[in-house]
Amino acid sequence: MNHILNIKTNKRIEAVEITNKVNELISKSNFFSGICVIYSPHTTTGILINEIYDSSVVEDIQTFLSKLVPHKDDYKHIEGNSDAHIKSSIIGPSKTITIENEKVVLGTWQGIFFMEFDGPRLRNIYVRFIKG
């Protein structure tokens, strides 16, 4: 069964930390162990796992992606958001994470982020638990 997280972004490029929301879904589902697939069905977003305790790390990732793939360039896509599509392709739309003891298994400093590259928008993220 899919669970849906509703995310409201406030900026064009934004990282929204969702680790606690995913763990809450696991707890409410009484899911003890297996894997968790987190998927964003939007072509201008991504799912990232990286450092959670120092927000400057994710800010640096956003800055680097914006330098690597600038908003305005000689893109052919007429909607004007080609950079968002490319950034999404680099980060990727999903992550698969192990679940043990009713929580996602992450490193000490890791967290899960929803990455918005064409906001602000209302977005849905799908979360599925698979017993293993």
Image (spheres, rainbow, N blue to C red):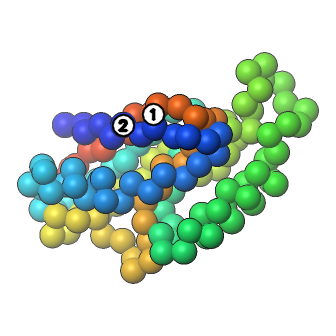
Residue count near mark 2 (Cα–Cα under 10 Å), binned few <14, some 14–19, many ≥20: few
What quarter of the picture does the N terminus occupy? top left
Q: Which mark is residue 6?
A: 2
Contact, CB < 8 Å: mark 2 with mark 1?
A: yes
Question: Vertical placement of 94 versus 118: above or below?
Answer: below
124 sits left or right of 70 in the view: left
Q: Residue at x 25, y 58 (%)?
A: 23
Residue type beneath disc 1: Arg
- Per the model, the C-alpha gap separating discs 2 and 1 is 6 Å
Q: Residue at x 44, y 71 (%)?
A: 110
Q: Residue at x 29, y 54 (%)?
A: 22
In the displayed orientation, state which residue is furthest to the right: 74
Residue 72 percent coordinates (x, y): 85, 36
In the displayed orientation, state which residue is furthest to the top: 78
**Tag 2 secondary structure:** strand
Q: Is residue 119 visible?
A: yes
State the count of labels: 2
Q: Quadrant of residue 86?
A: top right
State the residue in front, 13 or 112: 13
State the residue in front, 35 or 49: 49
Residue 117 percent coordinates (x, y): 63, 41
Residue type beneath disc 2: Asn
Q: Which residue is mark 1?
A: 123
Q: Earlier in the sequence, mark 2 or mark 1?
A: 2
Residue 69 percent coordinates (x, y): 79, 47
What quarter of the picture does the C terminus occupy? bottom left
Q: Quadrant of residue 2?
A: top left
